[in-house]
Amino acid sequence: MPKATPIEIWFQDEARIGQKNGLVRQWARRGTRPRQPADQRYENAKVAPGAHAVLIFDRAGWHTTPELRMPANVTPIWLPSRSPELNPVENVWQYLRQNWLSNRVFETYDDIIDAACEAWNNLTAQPAVITSIGMREWAHVGHT
């Protein structure tokens, strides 16, 4: 890889915004069952032209299948098994879904990007919340 190649660091996680909504609290008339929208379409994010990505994966079965073909411009790094604490974005996505992204189906890919950007902007306006979501006490042992 040439020295001038831009490097992108990606944490792999299936956020599936607007597709497979998780269970969240909803207001509904007593005795009714509110509908929760779901969407089966999908589109993947892409590495910028001319860049190389380092992709950090958990070890979910569909990430470790022998049929997985990695493009030449992507280098995988596998996290240890059963260690979601090493990928704090899992908690960030959960917070974004619970607060801004659940119970919605989007018309277009751009609508998904717009909603995700709005949710990220809402979150980045709250640095203390980001700290509490991503904080790992074990990472600070012995540091003052």
Image (cartoon, helix red, strand yellow):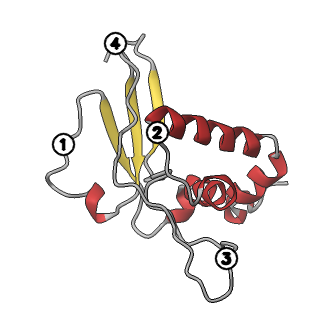
**Residue matched to label 2:** 10
Residue drawn at point x = 29 percent, y = 55 percent: 63
Q: What x and y, as percent, mark residue 39?
A: 40, 55
The answer to which of marks 4 and 3 sits earlier in the sequence is: 4
- Type of amino acid under label 4: Pro
Where is 25 relative to 122, above or below?
below
Please identify, in this view, whether the residue under mark 3 or under mark 2 is nearer the observer: 3
Q: Give the residue displayed 45% in from the left and 52% down from the top.
A: 16
Tell me the element at label 3.
loop
Asked whether disc 3 touches disc 2, contact meaning CB atoms under 8 Å apart, the reply is no
- Comparing 51 with 35, the one in front is 35
Disc 2 residue crowd, few under 14, some 14–19, many 20+, Cα 10 Å: some
Residue at the (68%, 64%) spot, across then down: 138
Q: Please identify, in this view, whether the residue under mark 4 or under mark 2 is nearer the observer.
A: 2
The residue indicated by pointer 1 is 69
Image coordinates of residue 123 in percent, x first then y, are: 74, 46
Residue 2: mark in rendering = 4
The CA distance from mark 1 to mark 2 is 17 Å
The residue pinned by badge 3 equals 28
Q: Quadrant of residue 144?
A: bottom right
Left or right, 136 with reference to 125: left
Between 24 and 31, the one nearer to me in the picture: 31
User: Which of marks 3 and 1 precedes in the sequence?
Assistant: 3
Q: Earlier in the sequence, mark 3 or mark 2?
A: 2
**What is the C-alpha distance between the residues marked 4 and 2?**
20 Å
